[in-house]
Amino acid sequence: MAEKISILIVDDEESVRDSLHNWFIEDGYDVERAENAKNALLMLESRKFDIILADIKMPGMDGMEMHRRIRALNKDTIVIIMTAFASVDTAVQALKDGAYDYVTKPFDPDDLSHLIRNAATQISLKAENEALKRKVSTLEDIDDLIGQSEAILKVLKQVESVAQSNSSVIITGESGTGKELVARAIHSNSARKYFPLISVHCGALTESLLESELFGHEKGAFTGAMFNRKGRFEMADGGTIFLDEIATISSKMQVELLRVLETKSFVRVGGNKEIASDFRVICATNRDLKSMVKSGNFREDLYYRLNVVNIAIPPLRERTEDIPLLVNHFIKKYCSSMSRDMISIDPAALKHLENFEFPGNVRELENMIERAIVIGNGREIKLRDLPMGKEAINSSVESLDELEKRHVEMILNKYAWNVSRSAKALNVDRVTLYNKIKKYNLKQQQ
Amino acid sequence: MVACGPFEKDFLKKIAQSAEKEFRVPVTIEENHVDLAPFYNPGRRQYDANKLLSFISDRSVNESVKVTGLFRVDLFIPILTYIFGQAMLNGRSAVASIYRLRNEMYGLKKNEELVLSRTTKEVIHELGHNFGLIHCHVQTCVMRSSTYVEDIDQKSQNLCPGCRDILDKK
């Protein structure tokens, strides 16, 4: 149930205080009274009020001075100034000082009801807005940047400090290291988080398509342009634009991009009207842009315009201590999305992952875990569930006993522990198979 | 219900019956030929409802639990330009006036039925406050706040299920 709106009535006339008190109590508000400004300020030290109705003319401190002090304590409090002696100058001053309204006694009952109702609506909208902002913050705090290694902690620290600024950022790293995740983390921790993050995959588009995508186009600008279309720069107004694979853009696009970054304005394809847009730029690449500048394949002026801050994400093989955390994270993610009970990972399988090269980095690891959960049928991810598992099994087994044990177990699992069929497949009799089961202490997984 | 002015008996009886039906308590009618001069405010040219409320409260009218004074004069409280009625929340007394419930007040044709309907709703509304009910947001509930006569005409003279529930629990 929503909290009651609280009202403080400050007036030296008892009849006024009591009348207003009775009026508001009938509307279900939480109402208190103070006979002068000093007492009102004392009350405000111990509790907050949503709305304060204050008379101007009071002995001691007047309503205007009290209002100024209230604003200093809490600028969100709605203060309504009342007076029996209307004056334009005082009204203007009160409103300039931030009063919600200035009303003359006696009030028309309908006017009073509307005034308080509108103030109450403003308070509840503000509270709803704050709650939604908090919710957005929670949703955007995606902790997919998993890791405790020094390398990834350095990245997280860079994200934290760069997020607060408006500086352009280039994120570098091999494919699959999480460059877009870092871009999202920067955006969601910045002042622009309530505005869009617009992503553009520059490498996936031809030059002309990229131009139209970024700048938008006017109707008829080219064949197929049936309608006016907003570009990504326009959509990113107030927010962030993320240009992935920035190294793939043509020389012509580099020139156009530089102009947009410098003027923060552009013209749609086929148009002639300058459009302004306030956005922050984050780029990503897996190429060595500096070398490309040296070789003349990337403009130096654009490079320096974009590369105010550089965040380099290490490849997964350089932070293997993060693999267990990432594995647990992906297991949780996919078990949840597949509505499955949580499973664990066999230590041998985990060990193998930690020793794996991962040319595809975190993306490859995620893919492996998802596949293992889909094809696996136990409560534990085994080495055989991983794509390179068979080779690993073969390479890790050294003794004949170990080899035999694994083979017998594999056959039993294949035939769902039907001993007769398993024995037939192994070309042994049932007694021999039972002896092997006993010898290697094999158990059927539930 | 204390009639503090000349009212037709039938008029008072119908209001009393409606209030009885709504609150399921017996309602008796008394007449009181009170001199209203002491309650008059010449500056406002209206009658002080707070003082009248105290006056009504002080009258010992038999074993009635709640006392509602019905008037024909224009009522005010200091903070508002006018009121239709006033009651003590969870209290013993209430006042209501037909003065601003009459069509003639707004330059419209006289309509006695409408005055009866509006007065009935106003009396039930103020009695509702005496029984501890606050204003209700349900459009048709008699406890909905009314600042214009048109508001009174739009609501019914009955409590909504929510208010009925609150009343029954008291």
Image (tube, helix red, strand yellow):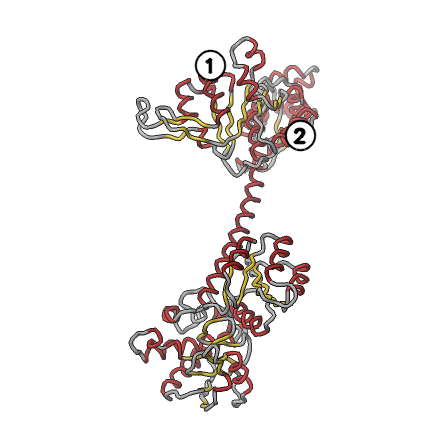
Left or right position of A64 against B144: right
Image vertical order of residue A67 relative to residue A392, above or below:
below
- Chain identity of mark 2: A
- Say if residue A398 shows up in the picture: yes
For the residue pair B83 and A10, the one nearer the viewer reads as A10
Secondary structure type for disc 1: helix
Give the x, y percent position of residue A223. 30, 22
Q: CA distance from mark 2 to mark 1?
A: 34 Å
Instruction: State the quadrant of the C terminus of chain A.
Output: top right
Q: Chain of mark 1?
A: A
Q: Which residue is mark 2?
A: A157
Badge 2: few (under 14), some or many (20 or more) residues near its Cα, within 10 Å?
few
Q: Residue at x 54, y 81 (%)?
A: B92
Mark 2 vs mark 1: in front: 1
Label of residue B63 in the image: none
Q: Dot 1, crowdedness within 10 Å: few (<14), some or many (≥20)?
A: some
CB contact under 8 Å: marks 2 and 1: no
In the displayed image of the protein, which residue is found farthest to the top?
Answer: A295
Quarter occupied by residue A313 = top right
Residue drawn at 67 percent across, 17 percent down: A396
Give the side of residue A4 with respect to residue A229, left or right.
Answer: right
Viewer-side residue, A297 vs A34 = A34
Return the residue at label 1: A251
**Which quadrant is the N terminus of chain A positioned in?**
bottom right
Left or right: residue A51 compared with residue A274: right
Vertical side of B121 occupied by B9: above or below: below
Q: Amino acid at mark 1?
A: Ser
Three-letter amino acid code at the position of disc 2: Lys
Q: Is residue A372 above or below residue B161?
A: above
Q: Earlier in the sequence, mark 2 or mark 1?
A: 2
